[in-house]
Structures are given as C-alpha cells and as structure tokens.
Image (spheres, grey):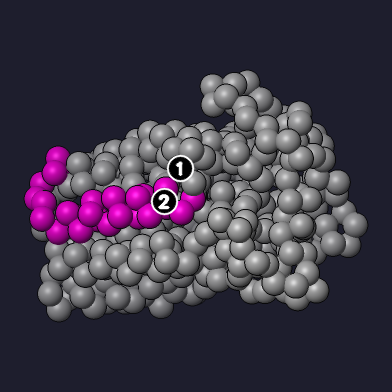
Amino acid sequence: MTYKLMPATRSTAYRWKICALLFAATAINYIDRQMIGVLKPVLQHDLGWDERQYADIVFWFQTAYAIGFLIMGGLIDRIGARVGYAVAVGFWTLAHMAHGLVSGVVQFALARFALGLGESGNFPAGLKAVAEWFPQRERALAVGIFNAGANVGAIVTPLIVPAITLAYGWRAAFVATGALSLLWVVAWVAIYRRPGETAQVTQGELDQLRGDASPVAVRTPWAQLFTRRQTWAYAVPKFLTDPIWWMFLFWLPDFLSKRYGLDLKSFGPALIAIYLMSDGGSVLGGWCSSRLIRAGFTPNRARKLVMLGCAFAVLPIITVQHVDTLWTAVLLIGLATAGHQAFSANLLTLPSDLVPRSAVGSVVGIGGTAGAIGGMLIAKFVGYVLDATGSYGPIFLVAGSAYFVALLALHLISPRLEPLAGFPSPL
C-alpha cells in the first residue's frame, strides 16, 4: 500500500507516541515482576517459604527469562515488533494473573516461569521499535525514556499493591494488576506501524531514518551472531550488570524491612524515592550521551564516558549496610539505582549502533539471556549469603564493583564500537 507522507519540512511527534507506549509497557512489565518483592513478607508468612525457597522461585523466573530471550529475540526479528510485542504482553498477562490461583512453592515457581517467558519479549520488541523509529542521535534518549518505565512500575507497585492486598488479599492483587496489560495491547495494535507503513510521518523524517540504515539489507544468520564481537560487546556487560538490578527489585524491600524495620504499610515512601531517582538517572543517562553526540563526540566516546560516570555513581552502595539513618541509605541506594539505569540506557542502545535493524531483536535477545543467567546466579548467591550470614554487606560489595568491570569488558571487546561489517559507521 502506498501512503502519502506529510511534507518534508514539517516534523511530527508520532515517534514519541510510540515511545510513550514503550514506556507504558515497561512500567506494566515491572509492576508484574516486582510484585513478588513487595509481597515477599506476606507470601513467606502465608505460604511458609524460607530464604532459599524464595531464591529458588526467583531463580526459575530468571531461567525462563533467559530461555525466553533467545526465543523472543529471533521471533520478533521475523514477525516484527507490532505482532511480537502484542503476543508477549498477552502471554505474560495470563501468567501474571495465574499467580492469584496457585498455592505452594512449586505452583508459584511454575507461574513465575511462565511470566519470565512472556516478559522476555519486552526489551527485544521495544528496542527494535526504537531502531525502526528513531535516528541514531535520538536513540539513547528514547531508550532512556522507555527504560524509565521500569522505575515508574517500581514506584507504582508499592503504592497500589499494598492497598489492594490489605483490602482484598494478595491473590486479588495479581488479578487486578494484570488487567492493565490488556488495555495496552489494544492501544499497541491500533497505533503501531513501521515508518513506511503510515502517513503519520514526514518525508524528511523517513529519509533520515533510511539514511541511518544500511543501504543493503544485511541478514546475519542467528547462529553466526554468537561469533561477532558486536554481540558480546552487548552481552557481557548485560551479564555483569543486570543481576544488580534484579537484586534491587527482588530484595530491596526485604533489606529495608530487616535493616530499618519497614513493613508493607511503611516502605512505600522509601521505595518511591529510590525509583524516582532511578527515573531521573535513566532519562539523564540517555540525554547526556545524545547531547554529547550532537556536540561532536563519537558514539563510542559519548556512551563510554557516560557509563564511566554511572559506575562512580553506583560505587557508594558498598557502604549502605553500615548506614544507620534510613534516608541516608535511601539516598545511597537511589544514587546506585539511578547510576544503573543511566548505564543501562546507554548499554541498551548499543545493538542499534552495532548491528543492522534486521538483527537488533536477536542481539538484544542474546544479551538478555546473558543478563538473565547473571540474574539466576545472583539469586542463588543472595539466598546463600542471607541464609549463611544474614548480612547484605557482601551483596552490596558485588553491586558496587560490577559496573567498572562491565565497562572494562565492553572496552576490551570493542574499543571503538565498530559496527558489524556491512552496517554503516555510526560516526
């Protein structure tokens, strides 16, 4: 079908509507996954879990997330972001609502496994949509904005979930929050099209997007992506840093409860403050590298300089175990989570910098699997440390050092962030 595009001299906000939908999906994604952390004390009391059983449930979610990323990345490259995203959100919604019907560790773990499979489609589809709709100089900002949805989800969760739980029980909380996703699926299917399939874009914008793409469609076989340094430049830092975010999501309420005596009714303000700081970090991290690129920095230099600053922002987390004042601890944790999200906003942009759009979903999937494997390991590590020592000290020590190691690994693997052969230089 041929579309009559808007005049080249005009500019539309259509791509930012797409970004808003990505933001909303990520917020819903994080509400669904973080609920187990917020409800951990209630679930442990009602279902009789110990620390290692809780860690096992987290482990199986991460296992499914790792498997799902490998499947979803390639699937979304084949069927496209529009259909792929709708399928992923629909599947994880059913799995999320099923939590309200289960009892016992095994059934709960099965529901989490299904949730992990579905939720693994969020970032491959979202990053593919960004690669399709945003020129390179805007991608980090767009990724930062939609990735900030994770923090909004983390903020909303302690606001609405305790209220629903106290009024109707934790089972009703899973069913009620799942309904949000269904509204999003309807909006996504109705609105999302690729740039060449809608008149809601100017000729100038379309020309700019085509100018950022390879002039010849480059199709790299999925298995061959494992042999490319561009893939590992993304996957290795994901393996090293994603586990830290998982640790915050699944154990931060528990830390605040044990260290500062907070409970389901009282830890909301602290979590909200932490994730508001995270939101600021996500957008600021994306904006900073986009601004540096506009100022003449190469993407390689811009992204790595911002990521280095992020690593220093996370470092003070190693001291938080010894902080006696709640709000000082909140400040240190918020700084660390903001640093993670700013680091992540730049890291998540790398696939669209380094590989053709036809391979973005696959590379994101491979990197997501690496991050989920790291999450599986951190789950076992945290469960073991807490059972053995009861202290979060060793856990925060790992968190504080991970980003320096990740940035060093990225630089060793790809000193100049050179794109895959056949893909145009980002300079």
Q: Secondary structure at mark 2?
A: helix
* Along the line of sight, the residue nearer the viewer: 50 or 324: 50
* Along the line of sight, the residue nearer the viewer: 112 or 296: 296
Percent of width and height locating residue 263: 28, 70
* Label 1: few (<14), some (14–19) or many (≥20) C-alpha neighbours in 10 Å: few
Instruction: Check the image and report above or below for 199 versus 293.
Output: below
* Along the line of sight, the residue nearer the viewer: 134 or 306: 134
Instruction: Check the image and report above or below for 346 versus 157.
Output: above
**Residue 250 vs residue 293: left or right?**
left
* Label 2: few (<14), some (14–19) or many (≥20) C-alpha neighbours in 10 Å: some
**Residue 363 vs residue 350: left or right?**
left
Q: Main secondary structure of the magenta part?
A: helix
Residue of label 2: 83
Percent of width and height locating residue 83: 41, 51
Instruction: Check the image and report above or below for 415 versus 320.
Output: above
Q: Quadrant of residue 253?
A: bottom left
**Residue 288 vs residue 376: left or right?**
right
In the rendered structure, does residue 260 fall within the stretch colored magenta? no
Residue depicted at 90% across the width and 57% down the height = 296
Q: Which residues are magenta?
A: 81-107
Observer able to see residue 63: yes
Q: Secondary structure at mark 1?
A: helix
Observer able to see residue 406: no
Residues at badges 2 and 1 in contact (C-beta under 8 Å)? yes
Amino acid on which disc 2 is placed:
Val
Residue of label 1: 79
**Residue 314 vs residue 87: left or right?**
right
Per the model, the C-alpha gap separating discs 2 and 1 is: 7 Å
Amino acid on which disc 1 is placed:
Ile
Is the N terminus in the top left, top right, bottom left or bottom right quadrant? bottom right
In the rendered structure, does residue 94 fall within the stretch colored magenta? yes
